[in-house]
Image: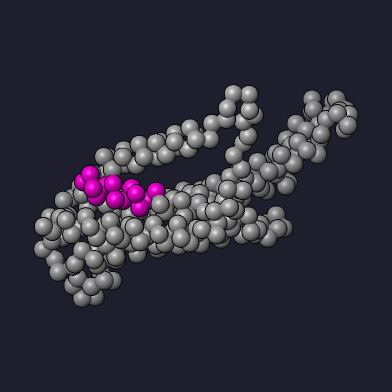
Amino acid sequence: MKKGSFAGQLYREFYLARKSYITGLIMFAAWAVFGWLTLVSFRYGNIGKLVDYIAAGNGGNVALDPEIFDYEGLQQKIKSVLFLYLKGFPALMTLSFLFSGADIAGKDELSTWQRYAKCTPVTPARRAAIKTLMNFIAAAAAFVLSIGYISFIDVLIGESITYREITVLVSAVSAVTVLAVVAQVYIRFFRGMDKGMLALIVTVIAVEFAAFSLNTPKLGENVADIDFIGLCEEIFPFTPIIFFGALAVDFGLMYALYKRREK
């Protein structure tokens, strides 16, 4: 590789974030094994017996009237919660890859790399493009791993991946990409990991508080649970705009920050 080559700079980004990637893979693998073992126990072991035990009442010593007690309904609810853990948690662990850009930004600021970066022939546009490309690669890796895991679980339980599962995963990747971009920009702007992540937390809390205030039911109204899957299905057609829009904003803001520091 030539000095200052695009491939060399990409390798630098990967090298700085390699520990984050390894940690993310370990967490993903641990949750994947846990999910698989839970599934096996549900089908053939003690968890399956526990479902029957709870649904039957008093360990099966009391025969419950099926017209009064919904045995099948309770069993189905337990299955739904279990499958949510099986499919959701390992898949969500892959989203930690998206914060590798924030990890790199924190290490750059900690090592005062910016002071020496201006001595290289790399332009602000190229530096911003590299950061944006790394965010895209991390998002693609997270999506592929999560889809692969859910497909594997579906094969084990004799099902196929559904449209609803895809909408949830794509929506989650798009949403976390936005957060990762904001975190990266905050760290660069405030020139520190601690201040940048604190600003991100404050931003998330403020957005959640505003959303809660706007959707708080009036006195006397029933509080309905938020249908997250339904929400994901609603925003799914707009996820490409959200995802690539976040990357475009990332490039523009990073370019502006690098350009400002060269003055």
Query: Which residue is at the front of the view, 249 or 11?
Result: 249
Number of numbered discs on residues: 0
Q: Against 59, is 130 above or below?
A: below
Q: Is residue 28 visible?
A: no
Identify the residue shown where x is 52% and y is 53%: 171
Q: Position of residue 10 (x, y in %)?
A: 29, 66
Q: Is residue 153 left or right of residue 69?
A: left
Region in magenta? 179-191
- Prevailing secondary structure class for the magenta stretch in the rendered image: helix
Identify the residue shown where x is 75% and y is 31%: 54
Which quadrant: the C terminus?
A: bottom left
Q: Is residue 45 left or right of residue 108?
A: right
> Does the magenta portion include 107?
no
Q: Position of residue 149 (x, y in %)?
A: 57, 57
Identify the residue shown where x is 58% and y is 58%: 166
Q: Against 219, is 109 above or below?
A: below
Q: Is residue 123 visible?
A: yes
Q: Is residue 147 left or right of residue 185?
A: right
Q: Position of residue 154 (x, y in %)?
A: 66, 57
Identify the residue shown where x is 53% and y is 35%: 215
Q: Residue 148's quadrant in the figure?
A: bottom right
Query: Which residue is at the front of the view, 237 or 146?
Result: 237
Q: Against 185, is 205 above or below?
A: above
Q: Against 146, is 199 above or below?
A: above
Which quadrant: the N terminus?
A: bottom left
Q: Position of residue 221 (x, y in %)?
A: 63, 28
